């Protein structure tokens, strides 16, 4: 059975997987991007250069950050190497404000050709260590550029993470840092 929420997630994941998608004329302040339910989301950070919002249902945690000041979708050069966009999401899964081995995670998304493309994650092993970056997440993530209704290009970072992968159920608390 295809519910409205499952259809939304299928559409959203399809958009995140397609690197050529570039939305135009979107009211990012009101609607978010790529079907993100901004009206139902909780805004964690709303500053001049950045807005971070979260939303979840029974299956997924969805985090979307709009970087208002990043309108440059090209990769640059530094010391002769190509550099590109990188975004990170740190999850304090048990919400205890400490690094908890085998529980807490870091998710990273890269658009640089000099680093692994797409979403990677690592799992906390100790107070100062974590696993290598892994690419077997059942979640999806992307860095895309969206033209707002004002014609300005903005960066949108999106993470769609299965609650089962991070060991959470709908309604349970989690702490995160973008």
Image: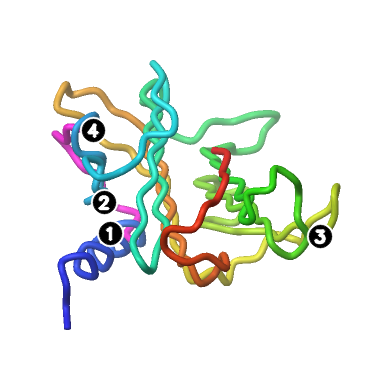
Q: Earlier in the sequence, mark 1 or mark 4?
A: 1
- Is 22 covered by the magenta stretch? yes
Vertical relation: 126 (above or below) 2: above
What secondary structure characterizes most of the magenta part?
loop
Real-space Cα separation, disc 3 to disc 2, in angstroms: 36 Å
Q: For the residue carrying disc 3, how many other residues have a C-alpha within 10 Å: few (<14), some (14-19), or many (20+)?
A: some
> Which quadrant would residue 45 be assigned to in this image?
top left
Q: Nearer the viewer, mark 4 or mark 3?
A: 3
Read off the residue under disc 3: 125
The percent coordinates of residue 82 (x first, y second) are: 59, 38
Read off the residue under disc 2: 21
Helix or strand or loop: what does disc 2 sit on?
loop
Please say whether residue 72 is visible from this viewpoint: no
From which residue to which does the magenta span run? Answer: 18-27
The percent coordinates of residue 34 (x first, y second) are: 25, 49
Q: Nearer the viewer, mark 1 or mark 3?
A: 3
């Amino acid at each position: 059975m295809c519910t409205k929420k499952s259809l939304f997630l299928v559409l959203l994941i399809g958009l995140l997987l397609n690197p050529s998608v570039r939305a135009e004329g979107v009211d990012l302040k009101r609607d978010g991007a790529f079907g993100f339910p901004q009206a139902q989301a909780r805004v964690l950070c709303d500053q001049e250069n950045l807005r971070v919002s979260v939303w979840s249902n029974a299956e997924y945690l969805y985090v979307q950050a709009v970087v208002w000041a990043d309108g440059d979708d090209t990769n640059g050069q530094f010391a002769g190497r190509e550099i590109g966009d990188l975004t990170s999401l740190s999850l304090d899964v048990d919400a205890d404000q400490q690094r908890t081995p085998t529980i807490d995670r870091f998710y990273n998304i890269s658009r640089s050709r000099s680093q692994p493309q797409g979403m990677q994650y690592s799992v906390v092993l100790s107070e100062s260590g974590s696993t290598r970056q892994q690419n077997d997440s059942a979640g999806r993530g992307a860095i895309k550029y969206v033209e707002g209704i004002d014609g300005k290009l903005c960066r949108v970072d999106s993470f769609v993470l299965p609650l089962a992968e991070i060991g959470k159920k709908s309604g349970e608390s989690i702490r995160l840092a973008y």
